[in-house]
């Protein structure tokens, strides 16, 4: 193979890796394994968890389907991203739409094959998951409020696959999931504001577009208040010295800071700061799982 051709393939592979947002996938994989080893070890021995082939298959399938979801999302959003992130998207143009679509089909087909070989239940879960990822990119993301809710639920669903496998859930897990749900929901709303220019041009009627700034900020404040409810409930159930509660408190303060930043000035630049702050909060939430 000629050096130029080889370099081109490496460059395309790097671009494809960037489109699939490997760092988000890595966080999801970490969250799944942390949950398995530190949450479900109350009911299952850690050695049994380590040797659980179906757990590793679920994590592998989650990786494949999330990557496929990002590919089909970019397939539909190329023009929007070209307005919001022109430099990055022009770099991604080295990947054609046909190649994106073919790679997406390959990922979905491979993921479903692995999932159904593992078990019929796992296969059905990922069949529904893959359909919803496509339907979100094709239709749901253009509907205000539904866009934010569906994106949040799909993010939580990847974690739910582990719960479905072990068929165990308790109050602490429910409250922590409720708390993380609102963190992700607020981040989705802030991301809308960050990407408002391109979405407005292509009629993506997200929450930040259909509402005036005052109503949009009210929506963020309401979600912040609702995120506080599981935090208090968690404290009442487990005591106020619980490690996970302290982590939740720090994350909630970061949430307040992110919303406060947008109150100072509601524009894409300030939304980007708030979005980055909540990215750190989501990473921090992985520590909370260790002591859950």
Image (spheres, helix red, strand yellow):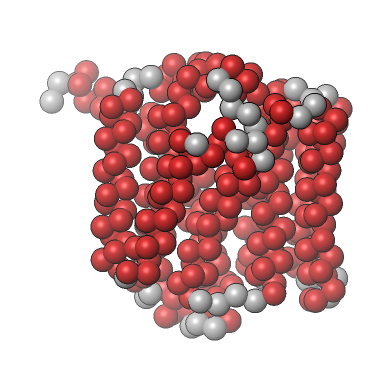
| Residue at (85% x, 74% y) in the render | 236
The answer to whether 267 appears left or right of 169 in the picture is right
Where is the N terminus found, in terms of image quarters? top left
Q: Is residue 127 visible?
A: yes
Relative to 230, say whether 140 is above or below. above
Image height of 201 relative to 234, above or below: above
Can the viewer see residue 272 in this picture? Answer: no
Which of 18/83 is in front?
A: 83
The answer to which of 77 and 179 lies nearer the viewer is 77
What residue is rendered at 46% in x and 35% in y?
138
Q: Position of residue 171 (x, y in %)?
A: 69, 74
Relative horizontal placement of residue 289, taking residue 21 as reference (left or right): right
Q: Percent x, y for residue 232? A: 84, 65
In-image side of 59 versus 234 (left or right): left
Q: Position of residue 67 (x, y in %)?
A: 41, 43
User: What residue is rendered at 37% in x and 49% in y?
Assistant: 64
Position of 3 relative to 112 (above/below): above
Which one is nearer the viewer's eye here, 209 or 60? 209
Q: Residue at x 70, y 26 (%)?
A: 209
Residue that protrudes farthest toward the left in the picture: 1
Rendered-image quadrant of the C terminus: bottom right
């Amino acid at each position: 193979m000629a050096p130029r051709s080889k370099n081109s393939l490496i460059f395309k592979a790097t671009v494809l890796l960037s489109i699939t947002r490997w760092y988000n996938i890595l966080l999801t994989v970490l969250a799944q394994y942390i949950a398995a080893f530190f949450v479900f070890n109350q009911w299952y021995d850690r050695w049994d968890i380590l040797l659980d082939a179906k757990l590793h298959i679920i994590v592998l399938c989650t990786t494949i389907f999330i990557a496929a979801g990002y590919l089909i999302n970019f397939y539909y959003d190329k023009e929007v991203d070209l307005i919001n992130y022109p430099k990055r998207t022009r770099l991604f143009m080295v990947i054609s739409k046909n190649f994106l679509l073919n790679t997406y089909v390959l990922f979905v087909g491979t993921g479903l094959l692995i999932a159904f070989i593992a078990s019929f239940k796992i296969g059905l879960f990922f069949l529904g998951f893959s359909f919803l990822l496509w339907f979100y990119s094709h239709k749901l993301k253009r509907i205000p409020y539904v866009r934010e809710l569906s994106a949040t639920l799909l993010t939580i669903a990847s974690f739910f696959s582990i719960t479905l496998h072990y068929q165990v859930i308790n109050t602490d897990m429910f409250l922590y999931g409720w708390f993380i749900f609102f963190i992700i929901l607020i981040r989705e709303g802030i991301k809308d504001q960050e990407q408002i220019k391109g979405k407005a041009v292509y009629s993506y009627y997200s929450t930040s577009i259909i509402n005036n700034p005052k109503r949009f900020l009210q929506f963020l404040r309401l979600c912040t208040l609702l995120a506080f409810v599981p935090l208090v409930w968690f404290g009442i159930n487990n005591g106020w010295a619980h490690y996970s509660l302290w982590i939740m408190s720090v994350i909630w303060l970061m949430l307040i800071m992110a919303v406060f930043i947008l109150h100072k000035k509601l524009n894409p630049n300030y939304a980007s700061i708030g979005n980055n702050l909540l990215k750190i909060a989501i990473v921090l939430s992985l520590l909370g799982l260790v002591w859950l």
